[in-house]
Amino acid sequence: MGNKLNPVGGGGWLPAGLASNQEADHMSRFKMPPQIFRLVLLTIGIVVSYLIARQLLTPASFRDFGFYRGAALEEVASRTPVYAGKKACDECHSEVLLKLAKGDHKTVSCETCHGVSQEHAGNPDITPVKLTGSHCIRCHEANPSRPAWFHQITVKNHYTGQKCTECHVPHQPNEVP
Amino acid sequence: MSLEITNAIVEAIPRFEGYVYPNESGTHPLWGFLIVLYPYITGLVAGAFIMASLVRVFRVKPLEPVYRLSLLTALAFLLCATLPLLFHLGHPERSFQIMITPHLTSPMAIFGFVYAWYLMAVLFLELWFDYREDFVEWSKTESGFRGILYRAFTLGVTDVSDKALALDHKLSWIISIVGIPSAFLLHGYVGFIFGSIKANPWWGNAIMPIIFILSAMVSGIALCVFNYMVLTWVRRRTLDLRCLDVMGMFLFYALVIDATVEALDWIHRAYSAEEGFHVMEYMAKERLFYTLSIGQVLVGTLIPLLLLGILQVLRKRIPDAVRKRMYFGSAVFILIGVLAMRWNVVMGGQFFSKSLRGVMSYKLEFAGVEGWFMGLILLSLPFIILTVLIKLFLAERLPTSGHVPHRMEGI
Amino acid sequence: MKFEFSRRRMLGAVSGALAGLLSAPAARAAKATVQKVFASSGAPNGYDPYKHKWLMCFDVDKCIGCGLCVDACKTENHVPQASHYFRTWIERYIIKKPKPGSDRTRGEVLVDSPNGGRDGFPPTVVPREEILKSFFVPKLCNLCEASPCTQVCPVGATFDTPDGAVLVDPNYCIGCGFCIQACPYGCRFLNPETKTAEKCNLCYHRITRGLKPACVEICPTEARIFGDLKNPVVDDPIQAFIQKNKVFSLKPHLGTEPRVMYANLDKEVR
Ligand code: SF4
Ligand code: SF4
């Protein structure tokens, strides 16, 4: 018998050292073929080390909200915004915003024309970007794809050599200066 | 400087016709040649395993000479099967997360377990039970590195009594039976990874796993023919022509079924002509002409069908030397054709926009992680592993126990 | 007898250890429900994701194709500059009149999006008389209810948050690109620098601070409507929009159930 030659492979549930000689006879009652015993041992080893690895390597916040790393929410949220937002402008320039709210440009945000102003909001000495007439044209140049309600001009026919702002006030587009 | 010029040229060549979503209009396909290799290699594994189970489960006696070779082939390719996936990841160092936090709704995550199951519960086990007697024997006769290796492989079990061996045979027969659906699962699953993408009408198709399995069987058998012929040639042995004929027969039948099902798929697509069929049709004609019409249909299907068909009918009348060449030729053509088929599936799905309004044209580079070179290295790796495996487990000087898988009395 | 006893004990010990290992994640999940508000430094303090449900919708009739939103998105989110990385983009549809004599209802449909619309749209080469109609359609992540990208991500690196965004965890994404293939709307791309998937996240760092997403902030015509479905205030823009308009979503047949909805959409838009 193979297990006589090699007690470790003998298929008992206990390592040879623990199973005393008298018990070896009892063992035959529970004998498991040696190959199978080895494989069962190996399988248990693999499964247990997988479970331990899983235990150690799963991020702490995993499944906090769902099947993902819960900490990711805060990580994604902690980037600093680039655009300051109309509310920030309102803190100092409320009079301009009031004027703006009366005309057709009421839906336009400050940074739509003045550009990123986060720095300016933090430090008024940094001036926001100066805008040019090409910026007006970007929206108002006639284009068959633009909706009909939108105010459009064909620059070729409309432009008479002046700057847009000589005739139009961006903050109050419905008024003529 | 030259880089600038190539860049300028690449910029100048229109990368797409019609409209494609801006995010799709890059210069590279998202999944390149590596992902073409991934289903190719897994398919070869599944096919080679099914080849081996023809011997063990279906007791096709003439195929005995290739039984162990096909199992080793399956193992060599399986060991490489995840490499292309791994290399194409943006963060290969995070790949362990797939096993640690597998998202159970993701085909890709489950693939990790299907793979582990197939490797450890099927292939390793079947090989171990088949080789156990030999390991015990070799560990006694061999010394040095080999001796240590074989001793380790016995896992300390030295019982080679008749009773124990009978159990070995019985178990490996059971494992083979479990192995067939597992091999189908393994490769069907690869098909499902593509078939589950409903966003892509070229991929999102219920028949995809079936097509993958069928073509896998074809390519796996072809690979075994190829390996067997090369091995006997290298060792200057005589080919067992009877074995070759039987392999050729199975190859022919598998190919017929595969070609029929794929043709059915196309007919169905063309007939139902759902949204987006026109752009796919255009793409197949313009972008996949060489790989689809020439590679897959002509080289991979029609020519081998013809060769193998002739061999089925006129086997007796063809001289042995010609017959061998014809088998070898069909095997090689099929291997090329199935590679082309994988290319058509993987790249075809990325050659047209999901807006269904345009097609892209990608250029595959030679260098780079997703380039040809890397792909060729990866493709030769399993052959290198196979050589090592053959040296270890099919060495000519090592006597084998002489038991034959099909002769399993008492089962 | 003694042996059997010890065997049972050993089995007990092994299965006990296994049970412990298996149940540990569950125990962790139970613990987690307690802490919900953002507390870490840098994150907007006290924000509770369960108290909001953000959503963006579009009124196609209001989009003038200025492309300022595309530019704002790139600036706000440091999106790679190249012309094939966009979290949001504008498409121009030009539907031509049917050819004279043809019995079709519409002619050819031309779609383009030069540089994602970031630089605005140059006047079209199609003569005005040949155009049946033309319009702009802004696109971004459709915030699918049954998002295929979340479904296929092998590691849970992309997910639906309780407050309505679909986020990518850049520190956990393995960069496999499966989600990019699975998104039917072409909303995702693999960031060439971080090598992880990226897409519109509704400017999660802004909305959690009470700001609007950059594109909504910048849009001059309010074509982009943004709001909170859980906002108790009656005149929340998104609630009003959904009430007032008949809306449609993109590729509904795929069953992704996009929450992003469009008013005044044409059938040609996919
Ligand atoms: S639109 Fe694309 S990225 Fe957004 S949730 Fe849907 S599938 Fe995901
Ligand atoms: S690229 Fe990242 S987010 Fe997308 S499926 Fe892969 S791991 Fe998930």
Image (spheres, grey):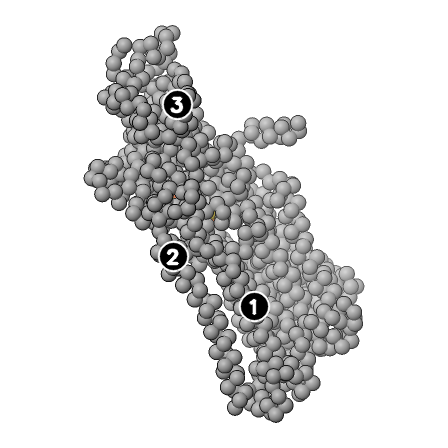
Residue A75, x across and y down, in percent? 44, 45
Of helix, strand and loop, which one carries label 3?
loop
Task: Find out whether the residues at labels 1 and 2 contact each other: C-beta distance under 8 Å.
Answer: no
Does any atom of ligand 1 lie closer than 8 Å to the CB of label 3? Answer: no
The part of the image, by quadrant, that contains residue C183 is top left
Left or right: where B158 falls relative to C151: right
Q: Let me know if marks 1 and 2 both belong to one chain.
A: no
Residue A18, x across and y down, in percent? 61, 84
Mark 1–mark 2 Cα distance, whole angstroms, equals 29 Å
Q: Nearer the viewer, residue B201 or C57?
A: C57
Name the front one of labels 2 and 3: 3
Picture residue at 53% right of the left edge, 43% below the top? C195
Residue type at mark 2 is Ala
Q: Which residue is mark 2?
A: C32
Left or right: where C248 falls relative to A6: left
Q: Which residue is mark 3?
A: A124
Residue A86, x across and y down, in percent? 32, 28
Please state the total of marks drawn on the protein image: 3
In the rendered view, tell whether residue A176 sits above or below residue A34.
above
Q: Which residue is mark 1?
A: A46
